[in-house]
Image (tube, rainbow, N blue to C red):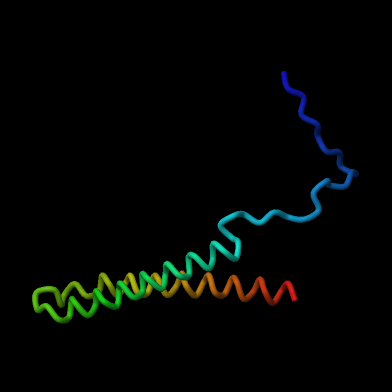
Amino acid sequence: MVHVPIMKKNSRPVLKKTALPWYDSNLSCLILAAAMIAVVLFGIDGIRVARRISGYEAYSWIPLLLVMGGLFVFASCVTRMIRRRTQRD
């Protein structure tokens, strides 16, 4: 049987700084933002191709969803990085 020490109610925690998850770091947000730019460009190209070919005009909403989703995730990452930088200063 393994003995796990339990922190008492009145004791101070050993770790004072909260650990950020790896997916919420600045580097991961930058990588995700760059990937979303690629997704948006891919979606814009898909819209161009769908409008150029007469049989695929009805399906141009699919790349439009890609563009909208990519822009949403990109804006979310940039907002998170800006908020983190302004709170730190």
Q: Residue at x 89, y 43 (%)?
A: 11
The N terminus: image quadrant: top right
Viewer-proximal residue, 40 or 30? Answer: 30
Q: Which quadrant of the figure has residue 81?
A: bottom right
Q: Position of residue 46 (x, y in %)?
A: 24, 74
Q: Which quadrant of the figure has residue 82?
A: bottom right
- Seen as rendered, the residue at the extreme right is 10
Tell me if 69 is positioned left or right of 49 in this view: right
Viewer-proximal residue, 45 or 12? Answer: 45
The C terminus: image quadrant: bottom right
- Seen as rendered, the residue at the extreme left is 55
Q: Position of residue 87 (x, y in %)?
A: 72, 73
- Seen as rendered, the residue at the extreme top is 1
Q: Residue at x 67, y 74 (%)?
A: 85
Tell me if 42 is positioned left or right of 74 in this view: left
Tell me if 23 is positioned left or right of 50 in this view: right
Q: Position of residue 7 (x, y in %)?
A: 83, 38
Image: 18 above or below 74: above
Tally of numbered discs: 0
Q: Residue at x 59, y 60 (%)?
A: 24
Q: Position of residue 57 (x, y in %)?
A: 15, 77
Q: Residue at x 56, y 57 (%)?
A: 23
